[in-house]
Image: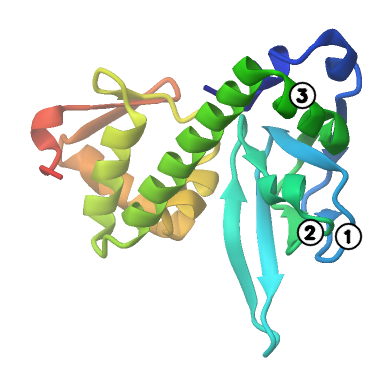
Amino acid sequence: MRAEALVGALPDRLRGQTRERPYAARETIFRQGDPTRCLHVLRQGRVSLRRVLEDGTLVTIHVALPGETFAEAALFSETHHCDCVADEASVVATLPKADLLDLIASDAVFASSLVELLSYQVHALRSRLALRNIRSARQRVLIWLVMEGKDGVVHPGRPLKAIASEIGLSPEALYRTLAALERAGSIRRAGGRIEFSRDMIPIM
């Protein structure tokens, strides 16, 4: 399930209170300590949740992709625990926190749908974290193809630069790896899609 489906399941009165706003690249969506008023859904672009440690180090704790919710802890906290910044031009929808909590308490079907969505996102996040622990760029890209693909085809639907950030590679490393895989005949790129053979993918 994607967050769009969750928004579609909202009662008309609450769906009518959903607001969308565009953000420019590097624009702040909220700051650590700001009051929490809504649940956020990323429609387009990419946003990062960042926290400043006591020694001043800036740590990225999560990157949200289109179709995902983010800062879900805001539902049960008075203030945000981190900063949120648009990594690129993005569109963010917001759902009123108070009304959403009332709906969760009164509608078991909607509450179940929300749990399903959050469970899916936790699984996807864990998969991305596991992918980042693979040292070999080639191995990391091949396994990403399996995770992202269907029937031997991947439709990225976003810039390779964004994919590189998701899997913890520099854009240059991803470009080089894809080019090497293409030269080796492991993948074929055409028309914005990547085709691959499962026979070429390492066993996970």
Q: Which one is in front, 122 or 103?
A: 103
Residue name at image x 75 percent, y 56 percent: 84
Percent across and percent down for residue 178 are 31, 44
First in sequence: mark 3 vs mark 1: 1
Is disc 1 surrounded by few (<14), some (14 to 19) or many (20+) residues within 10 Å?
few
For residue 93, say whether it is visible. no
Give the residue displayed 78% in from the left and 33% down from the top: 101
Find residue 46 and report its horizontal and vertical position in percent. Answer: 65, 44
The circle drawn on residue 80 is 2
Viewer-proximal residue, 68 or 168?
68
CB atoms of marks 2 and 1 within 8 Å: yes
Residue at the (57%, 22%) spot, across then down:
113
Q: Earlier in the sequence, mark 3 or mark 2?
A: 2
Q: Position of residue 85 (x, y in %)?
A: 75, 55
Residue 123 location, quadrant: top left
Q: Is residue 189 visible to the viewer in this orientation of the structure?
A: yes
Q: Does residue 172 appear left or right of residue 141 in this picture?
A: right
Secondary structure at badge 3 equals helix
Q: Which mark is residue 34?
A: 1
Disc 3 from disc 2: Cα separation:
22 Å
Which mark, residue 103? Answer: 3
Quadrant of the frame with the C terminus: top left
Q: Is residue 44 above or below residue 79?
A: above
Instruction: Give the secondary structure at mark 1.
Output: loop
Percent x, y of residue 34: 88, 60
Q: Which quadrant of the structure image shows residue 56?
A: bottom right
- Which residue is most to the bottom? 55
> Tag 1: residue type?
Asp
Mark 2 residue type: His
Q: Is residue 39 above or below residue 196?
A: below
